[in-house]
Each structure stands twice: as structure tokens, then as C-alpha cells.
């Protein structure tokens, strides 16, 4: 396994350097023209783990790539399918402990996932069917990432369980959001929000930093494989807060549904009372004998 990590630091350093370049470029943009604003970011809002300004910076950095894809007439569906391909390759790399290369592939997958929506809006081809495909691809990519880690950590039971709990939380956050949407319940900003963008940032960052820390923190091998401490920390954050976020959203949805049901029952009772009053009022009185 030692040879596995010889190449990973290169990918990791490149992946870490790119956001720093983006921060520098966006800072110049803010100084000259102010912050970039996007309706989609405004609708999503900021979270405790991912600020709105960071999301605006990310969208701003991807605009040139979206315009380039539009120029070459690449369709949103083609971008979505490319996203899942890179996600699968990233998960496969994690199976063999290639943290740095996996982080780069998953980062490309996530960028493509954002670009498909941008291209759809730029070309006027956005649709509910496209959103369904995009949402399905998101779930698959996230599964590939965490499933790859489950296989990699299979000899270290606590870390394998931690990864499974993170996988559970990730899927339950998505399910609770879809359930609330199906019940037409508007969820308030979660106190411990761990949506897909937040989860992705933490997991990719953990994977990217692991090849850098492994030569320093794991010179003496204590486990069958190198664990990558940043990766473990990222998994812990996602495992805890994703499940907390899911439970919070479920309770809010249940509360909203109960309030709605109580109001409906109260209204039905009032309507029934009004109907009885009208019947009694309109009923002809019996003739006197």
C-alpha cells in the first residue's frame, strides 16, 4: 500500500491549490464589482457548514465553464451522465486507498453536477425530468464515494461502521427533504444543516488532505491500512450532523402535518356545525292542530 500514496499527494496539492486560486480571483472580483449574486444560491441560502458567500464564489468560478459547454452544444443530460462516471471512478479509487486521485475525480463529478443545471438554465432546457435525473445522479455519486470507503475500511470495524452511519445520514437528509416536499411542507433553515453541498465539501476536503497527512501522522502503521485522519474527521462530522439534520427535518415535517390535520379537522367540524344550523333554520315548522 505504500506505493499507493506516492502519487496521491500530487493530486491532493493540485486540488487544494485550485480553491486558493479561485479565492484570490474572486477577491479581486469583489473588490472591483462586488459580490456575485445568483437566484439559485439565494433560494438555497447559507448553512452552518457552508456559507452563502462560498457558494456564490463557487458559482461564479463555474460560469466560464458553463458558457464553454453551451458553446460546444453539450446537453445537460450528457453532463449528468459524465458526472456519474467520474463519481464511480472516484469511488473505485477509494477502494484501493487512492485518496488524492479519488478527491480529484469526485470534485470533477460535483462540478459537472452543478454545471448541468447551469447549462440547462442558460439554454432554456431546464425541466422537472432533468431535475429527477440530476437528483438520482447525486445519490449514486455519494453512494460510490462512501461505499468505496466502506470497502477500504473493511478490516477496521469502527471506521467501517462510521462510514455506514455517514452513508445513512446522507441518504436520510435527502429522503427527509423529498418527503417534506411531497407533503408540501416548507422546511425552515435547519439548525445543523448538512445538505449535499456541505457533505461534499467536507468529504472531498478530507480525502484531499489525507495523502498530505499520512506520511507525517502514520509513519508507524497502527492499522491494516492507512486511515487518513482528515478523512476520518470528515466522516465523523457528516455521520453526526447529517443524522441530526435528518431527524430535525422529520420532526418539523411531522409537526407541520399534525398542525395541518388539526386545522382541517377543526374546519370540518365548523362546516358541519354550520350545515346543521342551516338545516334547522330552513326546516318548516309543524302546523298547529
Image (cartoon, rainbow, N blue to C red):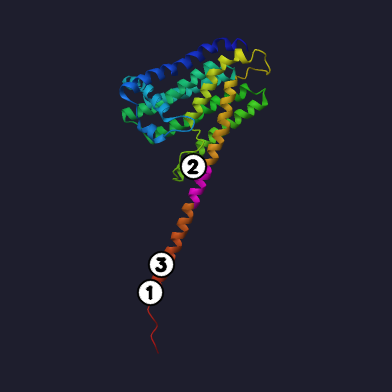
C-alpha separation, residue under disc 2 versus residue under disc 1 = 45 Å
Frontmost residue, 147 versus 192: 192
C-alpha separation, residue under disc 1 versus residue under disc 3 = 10 Å
Frontmost residue, 58 versus 93: 58
Q: Earlier in the sequence, mark 2 or mark 1?
A: 2
Q: Which residue is mark 1?
A: 281
Q: Quadrant of residue 3?
A: top right
Magenta residue check for 252: yes
The numbered dot on residue 274 is: 3
Magenta residue check for 72: no
Mark 2: few/some/many CA within 10 Å (<14, 14-19, 20+): some
Residue at position x 62%, y 29% in the image? 162
Q: Residue furthest bottom?
A: 289
Task: Identify whether 238 is placed above or below 152.
Answer: below
Residue 189 position, x and y percent, is: 46, 39
Label 3 element class: helix
Mark 1: few/some/many CA within 10 Å (<14, 14-19, 20+): few
Label 2 element class: helix
Label 1 element class: helix
Q: Which residue is mark 2?
A: 179
Residue 80 position, x and y percent, is: 43, 26
Magenta stretch, main secondary structure, is helix
Q: Quadrant of residue 21?
A: top left
Q: Earlier in the sequence, mark 1 or mark 3?
A: 3
Q: Which residues are magenta?
A: 250-258
Amino acid at each position: 500500500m505504500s506505493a499507493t500514496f506516492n502519487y496521491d499527494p500530487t493530486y491532493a496539492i493540485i486540488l487544494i491549490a485550485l480553491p486558493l486560486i479561485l479565492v484570490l480571483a474572486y477577491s479581486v472580483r469583489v473588490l472591483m464589482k462586488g459580490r456575485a449574486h445568483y437566484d439559485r444560491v439565494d433560494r438555497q441560502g447559507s448553512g452552518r457548514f457552508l456559507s452563502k458567500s462560498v457558494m456564490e464564489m463557487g458559482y461564479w468560478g463555474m460560469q466560464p465553464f458553463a458558457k464553454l459547454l453551451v458553446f460546444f452544444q453539450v446537453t445537460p443530460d450528457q453532463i449528468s451522465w459524465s458526472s456519474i462516471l467520474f463519481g464511480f471512478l472516484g469511488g473505485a479509487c477509494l477502494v484501493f486507498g487512492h485518496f488524492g486521485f479519488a478527491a480529484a475525480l469526485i470534485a470533477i463529478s460535483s462540478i459537472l453536477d452543478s454545471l448541468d443545471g447551469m447549462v440547462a438554465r442558460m439554454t432554456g432546457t431546464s425541466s422537472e425530468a432533468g431535475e429527477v435525473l440530476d437528483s438520482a445522479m447525486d445519490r449514486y455519486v455519494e453512494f460510490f464515494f462512501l461505499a468505496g470507503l466502506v470497502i477500504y475500511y473493511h478490516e477496521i470495524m469502527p471506521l467501517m461502521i462510521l462510514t455506514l452511519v455517514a452513508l445513512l445520514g446522507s441518504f436520510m437528509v435527502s429522503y427527509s427533504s423529498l418527503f417534506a416536499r411531497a407533503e408540501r411542507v416548507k422546511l425552515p433553515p435547519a439548525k445543523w444543516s448538512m445538505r449535499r453541498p456541505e457533505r461534499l465539501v467536507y468529504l472531498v476536503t478530507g480525502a484531499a488532505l489525507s495523502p498530505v497527512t499520512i506520511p507525517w501522522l502514520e509513519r508507524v502503521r497502527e492499522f491494516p491500512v492507512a486511515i487518513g485522519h482528515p478523512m476520518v474527521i470528515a466522516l465523523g462530522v457528516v455521520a453526526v450532523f447529517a443524522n441530526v439534520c435528518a431527524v430535525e427535518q422529520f420532526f418539523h415535517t411531522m409537526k407541520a402535518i399534525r398542525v395541518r390535520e388539526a386545522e382541517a379537522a377543526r374546519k370540518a367540524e365548523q362546516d358541519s356545525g354550520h350545515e346543521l344550523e342551516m338545516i334547522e333554520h330552513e326546516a318548516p315548522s309543524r302546523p298547529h292542530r
